[in-house]
Amino acid sequence: MAGKMKAAVFVEPGRIVLDEKPIPDIGPTDALLRITTTTICGTDVHILKGEYPVERGLIIGHEPVGIIEKLGSAVRGYREGQRVIAGAITPSGQSYASLAGFHSQSCDTGHGWKPMGGWQFGNTIDGCQAEFVRVPDAMANLAPIPDGLSDEQVLMCPDIMSTGFVAAERGEVQIGDVVAVFAQGPIGLCATAGAKLRGASTVIAVETVPERIEMSKRMGADVVVDFKKADPVDEILRLTDGRGVDVAIEALGTQRTFEACLRVLRPGGVLSSLGVYSTDLTLPLGAFAAGLGDHKIVTSLCPGGKERMRRLMNVVASGDIDFTPLVTHRFKLDEIEQAYELFANQRDGVLKVAITP
Amino acid sequence: MAGKMKAAVFVEPGRIVLDEKPIPDIGPTDALLRITTTTICGTDVHILKGEYPVERGLIIGHEPVGIIEKLGSAVRGYREGQRVIAGAITPSGQSYASLAGFHSQSCDTGHGWKPMGGWQFGNTIDGCQAEFVRVPDAMANLAPIPDGLSDEQVLMCPDIMSTGFVAAERGEVQIGDVVAVFAQGPIGLCATAGAKLRGASTVIAVETVPERIEMSKRMGADVVVDFKKADPVDEILRLTDGRGVDVAIEALGTQRTFEACLRVLRPGGVLSSLGVYSTDLTLPLGAFAAGLGDHKIVTSLCPGGKERMRRLMNVVASGDIDFTPLVTHRFKLDEIEQAYELFANQRDGVLKVAITP
Amino acid sequence: MAGKMKAAVFVEPGRIVLDEKPIPDIGPTDALLRITTTTICGTDVHILKGEYPVERGLIIGHEPVGIIEKLGSAVRGYREGQRVIAGAITPSGQSYASLAGFHSQSCDTGHGWKPMGGWQFGNTIDGCQAEFVRVPDAMANLAPIPDGLSDEQVLMCPDIMSTGFVAAERGEVQIGDVVAVFAQGPIGLCATAGAKLRGASTVIAVETVPERIEMSKRMGADVVVDFKKADPVDEILRLTDGRGVDVAIEALGTQRTFEACLRVLRPGGVLSSLGVYSTDLTLPLGAFAAGLGDHKIVTSLCPGGKERMRRLMNVVASGDIDFTPLVTHRFKLDEIEQAYELFANQRDGVLKVAITP
Amino acid sequence: MAGKMKAAVFVEPGRIVLDEKPIPDIGPTDALLRITTTTICGTDVHILKGEYPVERGLIIGHEPVGIIEKLGSAVRGYREGQRVIAGAITPSGQSYASLAGFHSQSCDTGHGWKPMGGWQFGNTIDGCQAEFVRVPDAMANLAPIPDGLSDEQVLMCPDIMSTGFVAAERGEVQIGDVVAVFAQGPIGLCATAGAKLRGASTVIAVETVPERIEMSKRMGADVVVDFKKADPVDEILRLTDGRGVDVAIEALGTQRTFEACLRVLRPGGVLSSLGVYSTDLTLPLGAFAAGLGDHKIVTSLCPGGKERMRRLMNVVASGDIDFTPLVTHRFKLDEIEQAYELFANQRDGVLKVAITP
């Protein structure tokens, strides 16, 4: 396996380029995956812009769909040639944090906890915008694709579907809840779908881009508030007769939306935050009820591991939700620089791109 | 019952005075309680100073221990002469919020939710620093005192014990947790006791007043960090080998302690906040892991209702915890102005005062 | 209001008859409801057959849809003429059990707990198969019907929708779960809908009556196993590749189905039981993993109270689920004896009947 | 490492003998542990008696305290010579079941679930009543012993402390609960301690052996009911004024105690079962409220993995609980047959034995 492969490599802020890299070696507990489809995430754009620092020369990408090319000597339960995905988060399952159920905040040395430590692909190890990727702790992470599902059908499972759904799960959405979702980019759209899937009777989405408003309704939003036409806080309070929402989901990563979530939340409600923030956040005294409102604020990083992937693919297989409409553009790996260009600038109504080597 | 009684009345910012007021009338679902012991809360001091606004002429106080003087015509299950307490929060049990389990955020009109709406005594209706108090929704709120318990043994149940414990409960303290508690005033001391009672193996308290450090150890703190001798964040991280704590409890109400809680929290941990804040709060980007740390922030207002009171009195009756040492000073109701003077200025090592009409 | 009204009265085992009874008087915390639509429940048939004992002369029925005729003197927040429902369970919200969140197991005297104590209509007080019904603790129980919803659209909320959904809720159904539901009578059908609403990716229903199989699919079942064509335990294990289901819901009330639930459950799974049993139950040693399988068994009685009803009507109003197809037959109150005859003998594909005074 | 070692081997029902066996080989993810202290469990006695079947020739024992002799090539984060324990349950952390949080019901092949699959030592692989033991998935299972703790102080962590505590944890014991614990053998005693540690205000233990009654009080029981002097169901109902207990813990494994748990449970309460049953169980119709009592029944198998062990050792290190009094007898490994003889026949007031190679 001493060959070469093509891969999208972070060179310096502003430049992710297609380059040639050695096909990865694997250790006894790893697997080598031949990528058949992958995608670009908003986080990759943060990396591109230098807003999230990674090492130069790193292969980017954390949403792999592929075929097992090779298995480490200690890996049991899989066979080469099997179609699988792996999550964006690849826990070992064996750290203190993982064993406590916090797979995303985990590392395998020291005391075992590390913020975002479970996120390795395209962050601390080479990622999957490439022809091949090494999957660490393969037995914890490789999830076979059910027969009959296409690559594009499962392409959202590794990251945005897992992330969007966890907002509803950790937000404790209940049957009959009213839920607000701020921003309907790819993750916000999945959060909308997730909130409906958990039984929310009313999902109020906030967005202004027409294509996203349209897609939001398709994903289950009962009402979409266009924040350029009305103040979303006023509008949501009006829609709920002043009561506010049971759960407010932040899916953008700004002070304005974070704060709006708190302002539309009923006392005792949950602010479920998915955004990646780039500044300190402020909790306004009044909206926070001076600390006496029985509020909860929860943040969540994309859950990973093969069990999570198995469940998400079950949801896809059931036909209850179809995320393939989110794939608005398709590129060859050779064209990945163009794909970044389109995606980073959100041109042409792009939601998600599919990249095929 | 057309008589007069003595009561502590809010006159204007800076002045709570002993005055004469009519003994309250009661409606069909109320009870009239003859107060035998009550106390002053930090919140009352906020009222005194005009930092928390209430109507002029209101009787202050929300921690009643007493004897049933008279029952409304529709109240069943009690008898006059019975020794009871009522919680600081007096839910009807019948609002939408109450039926959803949020008794503290409840009201009985409109959509049924109101921030802090369950807190009535000394806030929206006359309170209990008086010879008599009207208890609304008596059937939901009167909790008989078990035989053998003195007034002072149950005096902390209506507010600070309920509040301190809920920090540990909503903070989801587990057996074997490491918990930090910032500030060891009366509520922080109860939070320390509550964290131990939920099975925390290590409680690290933060305080500097010698009497409070001493009391903190008595309430179960395993370590007390004197924040004047060492930076508490550094010290707690050192004590936990860089891992941080599972749950951090804020019991003061300042940006500094709120932020310190976040800084000592492991990813995936819970910041359980009890403080009454008086300014907007800032979440520092790094300590908040840019929103990706799987953190939870929960705020809690004192749980009330007779079932809560029953449980807390059971804890007292079991002998597992004794809060009577918190009563450092005793006054007659006639001397309540002196009591306020001492308590508001935290003189003479005061923790809690007992007031007896 | 000294008039007379028609009502379905339990005379003796085997006889529920239409009779004339006085229009109920109400107390200060009650309301008088003019019934516009009601229905018959399986439990009413148990009463009819003498299998569940109630006092002779009692008015039967616990699923009221109606109009407020008169409000007690202490009732605020409603107006006469308002369209409302009340749940089958009518908690006061003020007992120890209610305040602990167990509204169905509640009573207002003594220690406050009573198995099924929250179920009063047609059990311990007069019910609603009548022209009028007295609703106790009106403020906790009257839930206004949202504009635009018909009586039949909300007719399932007071009992079977609340009951069916709680099986999924207390069964802790998660996104991506595989759920089995044994029996697709009215409550089983609602459980199927509830499991889907909580995000189950696969619901496997077990039934044999063709109309119910058909309705089961309409309510969301992904697969229906006809237990006359295949052993349901074998079939479910086959469908799940030997893994078993995450949650098994019992909706019949027999040893055979209860046991089958346990046999199809993966270790760590939840058996969520709705059935009303009439014999002791056996837990087979093997299926119970000798007590070492990390199993949970939960039983649930229909949740009531106006907050629950409000949420269920929100679900109806959202259009996510439509239970009106369950109403297969319609009768006037005058014809209620015929309705009982049809329903008790499950003739003519009956699922639920609508009764209108 | 081609040497020989002494080990307790299951020969046939009725015979566990000390024998010579090869020192185990280890693979890349394993560790070899030199046992310094171990003990005998009630389950081992079931194996001895042939009531629980294991393969002939298997080394028995699942409670290892020892020193790392050798680490597999892929194991990081430990060093040879380190003092560690491992839990009775040794999950890989990488199966579907493990990743879903069900470490005890896990296996690494097929669909990943297996009842009791996480229990390997002395069940499906060689155990630790020997001079050496191979620990599978070392990184998930080796838990370093905090400085200053003796072997006997941590000897109960791998099994009975973890098992006893989980009864309180999965039983959802809350501050102020009344808890009954049926039987005060080693596991019941740990359950008593665990219930107190979770904040139960009253633990009522049921036992008759004088030494165990005595030890029960030492472990925190507030009342011990001697079932030979009074019917425990009647007595517990009397002690709770007819209300019943919030949580009932079964720690024996018989129909009689299982049923008694249900009979003393308030509606809405939790029966938390630890017993290993040897017959089908019966749920009496009345005590089970015909399925309408909002009851929960949960069973639990000993949680394992290094994070669990770390937490339990923290509890020991905190000094909050001391289980060393449970070690009533000490033997050399050479004397293990005598140890079995004593322990299996519960002679001489034995609770737990310490075995040292």
Image (cartoon, coloured by chain):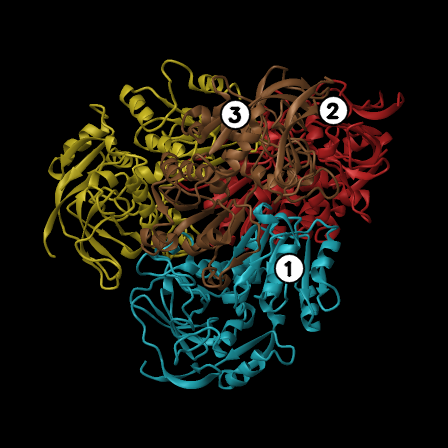
Chain colours: A brown, B cyan, C yellow, D red
Residues behind callouts 2 and 3 on a single chain: yes
- Where is residue A66? Give x, y as percent: 58, 21
Q: Mark 1–mark 2 contact, CB under 8 Å?
A: no
Please tell me how many numbered marks the rendered image carries: 3
The subunit carrying tag 2 is: A
User: How many neighbours does mark 1 have within 10 angstroms: few (below 14), some (14-19), or many (20 or more)?
Assistant: many
Say if residue B272 shows up in the picture. yes
Where residue B179 sits, quadrant-wise, is bottom right
Q: Earlier in the sequence, mark 2 or mark 3?
A: 2
Task: Give the quadrant of the C terminus of chain A.
Answer: top right
Residues behind callouts 1 and 2 on a single chain: no
- Where is residue D334? Give x, y as percent: 86, 30
Q: Amino acid at mark 1?
A: Ala
Q: Is residue C218 left or right of residue A142?
A: left
Residues behind callouts 3 and 1 on a single chain: no
The subunit carrying tag 1 is: B
Label 1: element kind: helix
Q: Amino acid at mark 3?
A: Phe
Which dot marks residue A331? 3
Where residue B114 sits, quadrant-wise, is bottom left
Which dot marks residue B260? 1
User: How many neighbours does mark 3 have within 10 angstroms: few (below 14), some (14-19), or many (20 or more)?
Assistant: some
Label 3: element kind: strand
Distance from Cα at disc 2 to Cα at disc 3: 31 Å
Task: Please name the residue that numbered disc 2 is placed on.
Answer: A27
